[in-house]
Amino acid sequence: MNLNSDEIKAAIRNKVIELAKALDMDASGVTDDDILPATGLLDSGAILELVVWFEASYDFRIKQEDMNIDNLGSINAMTNFLLSSKQA
Amino acid sequence: MPTFQTVPCVNINDEFVDVVSIDVKQGEFVNSGDVVATVETDKSMIDVVAEQDGYVLRVDCEPGQKIRVGAVMFWLGETRDEAIPEETKDTSSSASAVRQPTAKARAMLKELDIDPTRVPVSGERLSVADIETWLSKGGKPGKAAATTQTANRREDTPAVAGDLQDLSPEAAGMLHTVAWHRDYAASAYLEVEYDPKPWEERAAAYAAEHKLMLSPLLPLMAFRLAELGRERPLINSTIVNGQRFQYTPVNIGFTVQAGSMLYLTVVRDTQDMNAAQFISALGEVQRHAMAHKLPPQEATGATLSFSSMARWNVSRHTPILPPQTALIIAHAAPKNSDKAVLGATYDHRVLTGFDVAQVLLALSRPA
């Protein structure tokens, strides 16, 4: 499994764009620091889909108590959370 | 004393499951919660976990086999050499041994046309309580009972060319729910408009305080419904054979659309939870639904339900009552509107319009 930081960010960004498109939103301009729930590009259902995809794609489990903005709020936060989880 | 574990119900409409894998061997020690097998239906795949610690005395099924829900999967004992009771040794993996029903249970089985092999037995004999427990968890009467009414009004095949096709499990499940709604409940619907701002402000403050990823608006409203279920037990009950069946727990059903699949997920025992615990439990269940990995206890047993179609910007919807429940809330919040809608489909055998209006008004504002 590739855990290159840039590639992880690119994969997350592509998934965000795909999920936003399903809601008729254009997320092509999303940045790595944007707080995803605050962008209005994804609703709760889409964020849930993003998290489930993230777990399945990188074969790790996110505890319910870790489901917060600090850990998963942005593309950068998600990437850092994944990398630190894999190192733990 | 040896105990057995039976095939779990993956979906209330699937009588059989396929064994994908058996992850334990005879003689092996397992801890409660260990994954011991994986089973699947056309609809979903679930892990079967050991319900208690113990040595595996015997495994009664194998990968690739199709087995009936409720059949014995394996036996556990406190020691490796415990003897499995003689009378169960010929229990096949395709049908659990049927313990002798009591006289009342036999009458109930006949009346509801229930196959006794489908009902898990808690004691030495199959009892009325076993049947009621099974029904409360989503078990359904047998084909004869289910088709009695449709047989009386058999539909003609359309005159236009076409062909009959079998229903998918999902479509069959929807048919079962709709059939209960049609054949048993005296369903009615009413709704109120409300100002969504107080709830939105409450949810925004809660999300900021807890740094939540997902909006807690609908979970907070569903939790308020759970509180109302405690305060007003009538909405958390149903009618069974002319008597009111008052549920002890408040198990909240919450609809989740996962791709093309609509699940009624269930958070059990909400009467013991605070808002934070409920939101966390619901989040977990929603993730399982999104991954199409809902365990049976999270897909059955709703006693009171909440459904929202705000995501699809619908102005109102009238949901079908989940079997053996008296109330399901319908939430809608059209975009670009300063009004939102709380509706309710209810069983008029249990609730009056006044009862339901009171619930909707109480639910329309945070407590």
Image (cartoon, coloured by chain):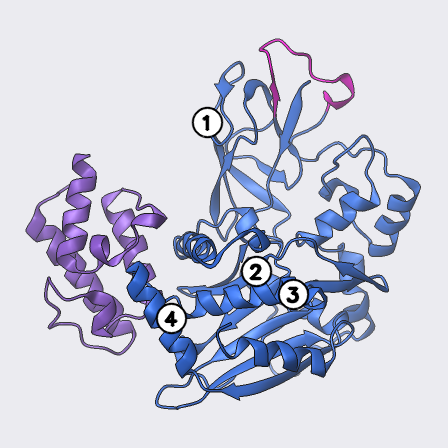
Chain colours: A purple, B blue
Q: Which mark is residue B231?
A: 3
In the picture of the structure, the residue carrying the numbered disc 2 is B252
Q: Earlier in the sequence, mark 4 or mark 2?
A: 4
Chain letter belonging to callout 1: B
Q: Marks 2 and 3, Cα distance to the nearest angstrom?
A: 14 Å
As drawn, which residue projects farthest toward the front? B367
Dot 3 or dot 4: first in sequence order is 4
Residue kind at label 4, given as amino acid type? Ala
Q: Residue at x 74, y 72 (%)?
A: B185
Which amino acid type is shown beneath numbered disc 2?
Ile
Q: Could you tell me how far apart the alpha carbons at marks 1 and 4 are, in whole angstroms?
A: 44 Å
Task: Check if mark 2's residue and mark 1's residue have beta carbons within 8 Å.
Answer: no
Closest to the camera, between mark 1 and mark 4, is 4
Residue B235 drawn above or below residue B65: below
How far is the residue under mark 2 from the one under mark 1?
33 Å
Q: Is residue B345 toward the left or the right of residue B274 in the image? A: right
Subunit that carries the residue with mark 4:
B
In magenta, the rendered stretch is B75-90
Magenta stretch, main secondary structure class:
loop
Q: Position of residue B177 (x, y in %)?
A: 65, 66
Q: Does the image show residue B115?
A: no
Decide which of tag 1 and tag 3 comes sooner along the chain.
1
Q: Nearer the viewer, mark 2 or mark 3?
A: 3
Disc 2 secondary structure class:
strand
The mark closer to the camera, 1 or 3, is 3
Q: CA distance from mark 3 to mark 4?
A: 22 Å
Sequence-earlier tag: 2 or 3: 3
**Which chain does the residue under circle 3 lie in?**
B
Inter-mark Cα distance, 4 to 2: 19 Å
Instruction: Tell me which numbered mark, 2 or 1, is placed earlier along the sequence.
Output: 1
Q: Same chain for marks 1 and 4?
A: yes
